[in-house]
Image (cartoon, helix red, strand yellow):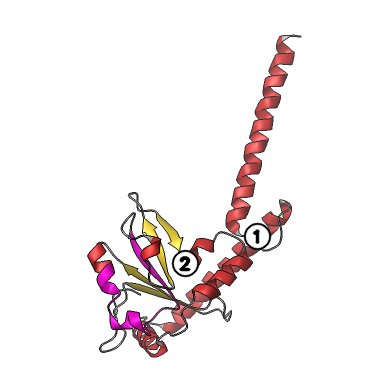
Amino acid sequence: MSECKSGVDGEIPDAIGFRRTGYDATDGSVLVEVKTSRADFLADAKKSHRISGGIGSWRYYMAPKGLIDPNDLPMGWGLLQVNERGHVKALAGHATYFKGRHDEYLRQACLWRFLDVDVSREQFLLVRALANTGDPQKVLIMLREANNRAARLTAAVERIAKALGLPQHTSSYEVERTARLLRQRIEHDFNKMSCLTTDIARHG
């Protein structure tokens, strides 16, 4: 959801997403506030919902590269940096651990989580979203299909990880990286063998 008021006089998040899987460590909401100027970033800290309460179990600023220094962030806030090509990189927050070890990611998710979340305003946003959904049953079917597809992909990643001799629950990023390194090694050995075969044939 984006640019939707969280109540009659509530804050208007630039973007917020919700996750509910039944796993408390990662369930919650992620708030993203986009800043394109230094003045806007500094003024944001003075808002009442930044001082106490507010929405978002995890909160991030998103800004162009160099606009916000991680050392200038309010306590508990993360930073998403956007470079000239539009690529987003997490510089602070639990998202920086997403591609690492799963247990460390869960630990960081707990450390970066806001506990004083204004749940009533988040509920207001969810009700607004539901009102604009259309047919809830159709959405439910789509979610089930997406979850089933995610489960199949997870199982496929685990099979590949096992075939590569990687530990259980290795992230898809690590699986891809290991597979890429293995492919490069095979290509290197193949090229080396081809050169050796050519030399043997040349010298009889």
**Residue positioned 47% across, 83% down in the render:** 115
Give, as a three-letter code, the residue at label 2.
Gly
Is residue 140 at all visible to an observer of this figure? yes
Where 191 sits versus 138, above or below? above
Element on which disc 1 rests: loop
Placement of the N terminus among the 4 image quadrants: bottom left
Please state if 164 lies on the left or on the right of 22 as rendered: right
Q: Give the residue at x 64% y 40%.
A: 183
Q: Quadrant of residue 35?
A: bottom left
Task: From the top left corner, tell me how far across and down residue 88 is, in percent.
Answer: 40, 57
- Label 1: how many residues lie within 10 Å, few (<14), some (14-19) or many (20+)? some
Indicate which disc residue 170 carries.
Answer: 1
Q: Nearer the viewer, residue 53 or 138?
A: 53
- On the question of residue 148 being in view, the answer is no
The answer to whether residue 183 is magenta is: no
Q: Is residue 53 magenta?
A: yes
Between 26 and 1, the one lying in front of the other is: 26
Q: Is residue 20 left or right of residue 16?
A: right
Q: Which mark is residue 93?
A: 2
The x and y percentages for residue 176 are: 60, 51
Task: Please state the horizontal and vertical placement of residue 80, each as a whole percent of the image.
Answer: 40, 62
Of all residues, the one furthest to the top in this rendering is 203
Amino acid beneath label 1:
Thr
Specify start and end residues of the magenta stretch as a single range. 42-63
Residue at left offset 61%, top offset 60%: 171
In which quadrant is the C terminus drawn? Answer: top right
- Residue that extends furthest to the right in the rendered view of this protein: 204
- In which quadrant of the rendered view does residue 52 lie? bottom left
Q: Which secondary structure lies at badge 2?
A: loop
